[in-house]
Amino acid sequence: MIIDTESHRVEYKLKLTDNLEKEVIAFLNYHEGGVVFIGIDKNGTIIGCQNPDAIQLAIKDKLKHNISPSCLGLFDVILEKIDNKNIVKVVVASGRETPYYIKKNGMSPKGCYIRIGSSSEPMNQTMIEDLFARRVRNSLSKIRSPRQDLTFAQLKIYYEEKGLKLNDQFTSNLELLTQEGDYNYVAYLMADSNGTSIKVAKYAGKDKIDLIENNEYGYCSLIKATKQVLAKLEVENKTAALITSTTRKEQPLWNKVALREAVINAIVHNDYTTENPPVFEIFSDRIEITSTGGLSTIKNLEDFFAGYSKPTSRELMRIYKDLELVEHLGSGLNRILKVYDKNSFLIKENYMRNVFYSNKTQLQQDGGVDGGVNGGVNGGVNELIVFIQNSPGLRANQISDGLQVPLRTMQRWLKQLKDDGKIEFKGSSKTGGYVAKSNDAT
């Protein structure tokens, strides 16, 4: 089997060789990153590779020890089956601390490479110096933690849950230290106690006038706070229902997969150098997820929407990958875009916001009765009447439960239908219920 030829983002290797670092460095220094396939020849023919487990370990070891600055958190090593043959895929994200180089050759044309077309070419000295001058200086790993009395019991528990044990060198292995040996800001975010808190606010309507719930998740390991936010939003992600005379269509307010990815992305890619954590706001018709950074960290919107990953903090990304909170680099955005289009992203200079309108809002727009709180019957009048016709004698609370509509909203809807002469209440207030009027009665 033959697949596509090499390109500016794809490199084929028949087997693992000593120049793998050169190819990876070229992708790290390239604004789109790239992918290296082991087990495919230069013509795109699938050959496969023997001992893929050993190859994966060797690749990780090479990239960990032979490239500077550290690229941990910026690559994935994945085993795939193509044409029933083992192929090892190395996915490389574009790095922020360019230029990356081969350690033994230093920051020189022999050590620095960049992708040009389908080949990895050495940089000239002018390019190297230019990239170094523009290198990100305020990365979290270089910022000293405001506290040095940090403990990491929570982080250790989360690693142990995944069958991973943090040894005595974990602060060095996870790059939680500055060059001077102090705890850095990544360590601060991962510590059992810190000053970072994530807000989840809930409003009664479509604006911020009526705040009905305000929760803070934080002052603990960012991993724990992430899990708390995910758990809270899972509770809030209730089922919306569209009911007709013949069908009942149920779905959560927001797509579960896309929502989870948006939450993780907001937390992992937030610019914590601003000391502003992400904010999650639930309105009657939508959820808004806001993180700091925006164009100041994304730089190129075309690359962003194409899924070319460029983690704001590779150290955070590595920990979240270790704990299986994120999967492959760049995969989260693709999952979101499968459900919500680019218009759901509001990207400004210093922040980014995801706006996901709830499925109940769409159901209302489509003319369905659901768990909406807009207070109007609109296109769902006929469906509500059909429900009452099929189940006469029910009281407001029973109809509310049946249609999964808030009681107050249902009471308004029933009043409007009653005022319009379409339904009536028969019997006593304790034992009676609503029935539909016949056409003759109206």
Image (tube, rainbow, N blue to C red):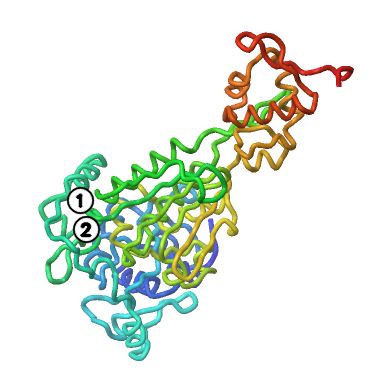
Image x and y of residue 68, in percent: 25, 73
Instruction: From the viewer's side, name the closer residue of 27 and 286.
Output: 286
Whether residue 16 is visible? no
**Mark 1, residue position:** 193
Which residue sits at x=42%, y=41%?
213
Q: Which mark is residue 110?
A: none
Disc 2 crowd, CA 10 A, few/some/many (<14, 14-19, 20+):
many
Instruction: From the viewer's side, name the closer residue of 294 and 95.
Output: 294
> On the rendered structure, is 240 left or right of 170?
right
**Mark 2, residue position:** 188
Q: Which residue type does callout 1 highlight? A: Ser
Q: How many marks?
A: 2
Image x and y of residue 321, in percent: 33, 52
> On the rendered structure, is 384 left or right of 119?
right
Q: Specify which label sits upstream in the sequence, 2 or 1.
A: 2
**Secondary-structure class at tag 1:** loop
